[in-house]
Image (cartoon, coloured by chain):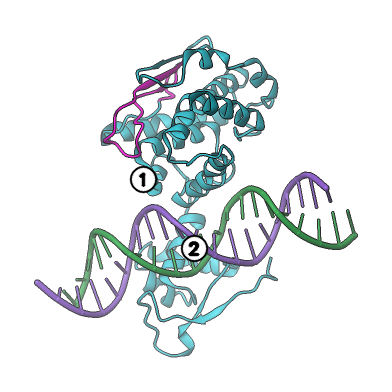
Chain colours: A cyan, B green, C purple
Amino acid sequence: METMSVQFMRCLSDSDSYGSEEEMAIKKGPWTEEEDSVLINYVNVHGEGHWNSLARSAGLKRTGKSCRLRWLNYLRPNVRRGNITLQEQLLILDLHSRWGNRWAKIAEQLPGRTDNEIKNYWRTRVVKQAKQLKCDVNSKQFRDAVRFVWMPRLMERIQAASSSSSSSSYAHDKTNLCNTKAQNESSGAKPITFCDNSVVVSSYSSGVGLSDTSTTSSCNLMGDGSLSMDCAEKGSMSSTLWQQWDYSDLQASEPANGFGDADLWTDENISFLQQYLAHDF
DNA sequence: AACGGACTCAACCGCATATTG
DNA sequence: CCAATATGCGGTTGAGTCCGT
């Protein structure tokens, strides 16, 4: 890890003012453990903020921006690391359908997750699959596919996992999402809820942003595990196609605990979507 | 085992907005 | 009010890792 090159460069940008030429040597690239502990100790004593002066006072040869980013995305307490859970994936898809690429805003609804992480998830998983399906990630086709195929399928898997496992991590996730719901309601948003036996995806906008409300759909995971879905939009995914969905194979491919593999983007799903898209257009 | 392409994610960049003097 | 500086955000990059051949 330490073999990677670490660049030093004269940095005149970012409004960093250093007293001497030597002090202007700004380090870039991956942070070392030593730098991390310096930053952690400094923030613990002096608090967050004033990043440029923090960088200088702490003796870190980094820009204030770099310190801030490192703290927020990695060192800050309660940063949640590891795989994005199914619930989180569902929430991301839901919130992205409302707010578009407002990563920071979306991240606020996922406790412990950073905007960077969510952005990376979107680009590496969702955008990649859109490309594989040969459609634009912002196209109506793809948004509908996400809304009417992937999201219900995610809910199905969440329900399957919750019924086959009463793991504490799931209970924890539910708690987090309930808290998130409370936060959202106070701010006017209407998120997916996980607080009871049903999972309700309320009122999707088919456009990126909140103003376009041409589509309303509601997907419900019932207490018995069955899925019901209403689409108010004319011309949306046909009931025939919807009925073609084969859930039996889904169960077969589900990991034992339901969360071992949180990735939904399987070849199987992709080929189904290709069928869906080909049928619709 | 070696190679190369695909993938992931930490970190950087540029720009917009907020704050300060 | 204005300029300088700080902060925050979204887009992009590239080093390291994974995985198939």
User: Could you classify mark 2 by the number of other residues whose Cα lies within 10 Å: few (under 14), some (14-19), or many (20 or more)?
Assistant: some
Frontmost residue, C1 versus A58:
C1
Residue for badge 1: A105
Kindly identify which chain the residue marked by label 1 belongs to: A
**Span highlighted in magenta in the image:** A193-221
Amino acid type, callout 2: Ile
Quadrant where the N terminus of chain A sits is bottom right
User: Could you classify mark 1 by the number of other residues whose Cα lies within 10 Å: few (under 14), some (14-19), or many (20 or more)?
Assistant: some
Q: Residue A205, percent across and down?
A: 34, 31
What residue do we see at 38% from left, 74% from top? A14
Q: How many marks?
A: 2
Q: Residue A93, percent across and down?
A: 45, 35
Amino acid type, callout 1: Lys
Q: Are marks 2 and 1 in contact (CB under 8 Å)?
A: no
The reply to whether the magenta stretch includes residue A195 is: yes
Residue for badge 2: A40
